[in-house]
Amino acid sequence: MPEPILRKSAKKTTYLTITAINEAVFLVIDKKFLQFIKQFKVSEFQTWDLNVQYSDEILKDYCLFHLSSPSQERIIDFSKSDFEIIKYKTKETEKRKYLSYKDYKDDWNREIYKGNTLIFNKLFLNFSSINFDIVRLILMPVKGNGYFVSERFKQAIEEQGFTGMAFKEIEQIDSRIKVIY
């Protein structure tokens, strides 16, 4: 397994930022934080031990963390959300509505294959349908991919003093996103 290399100016933190590999967003976290996560409501996940190079030492207290199943199928409220396709060659737009995640995903795959872009004008996320403290969303237009945490989990992280993370309300990421709790 490749070993991430921290810049000399970097600080050792609880969470280290890495680049996503397609929709498979992995977190690089220290093992103390992994034990902390296990105390909360988390769906099935996988971890892999990871060595991190830092200056002239190898840090062995990190791991890759990945929630096995994304949650967008249960969270997106398609009846209230509005989408649009931007055609690659002409830049023309076409409004789209979807009845289900399957319809959305099928269209996403077709349009991306053609080089087109799928965006949302309004995106409603209904978190009341789940009770996990951390979820992963993929195949989301624009800024929606990644990990999202409950307020309870966020507060516990801050109380414990874990480092390397910053939190924003989803509506602050993009004002076109509306959240139902």
Image (tube, rainbow, N blue to C red):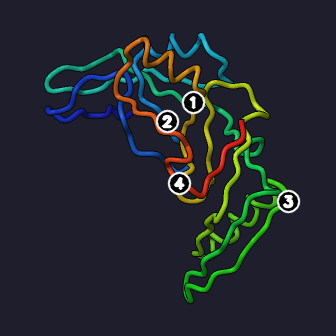
Q: Nearer the viewer, residue 4 or 166?
A: 166
**Percent coordinates x, y for residue 83 in the rendering:** 69, 67
**Percent coordinates x, y for residue 74 in the rendering:** 77, 41
Q: Mark 1 and mark 3 in contact (Cβ < 8 Å)?
A: no
Say which residue label 4 marks.
174
User: Which amino acid, mark 3?
Assistant: Leu
Say which residue label 1 marks.
149
Say what secondary structure mark 3 lies in: loop
What crowding class fits label 1: few (fewer than 14 Cα within 10 Å), some (14-19), or many (20 or more)?
A: some
Say what secondary structure mark 2 lies in: loop
Q: Nearer the viewer, residue 156 or 24?
A: 156
Left/right placement of residue 18 relative to residue 178 reads left
User: Which amino acid, mark 4?
Assistant: Asp
Say which residue label 3 marks.
99
Q: Mark 3 and mark 4 in contact (Cβ < 8 Å)?
A: no
Spatial separation of the CA atoms under disc 2 and disc 3: 30 Å
Q: Nearer the viewer, mark 2 or mark 1?
A: 1
Where residue 51 is drawn, which disc sits there? none
What crowding class fits label 3: few (fewer than 14 Cα within 10 Å), some (14-19), or many (20 or more)?
A: few
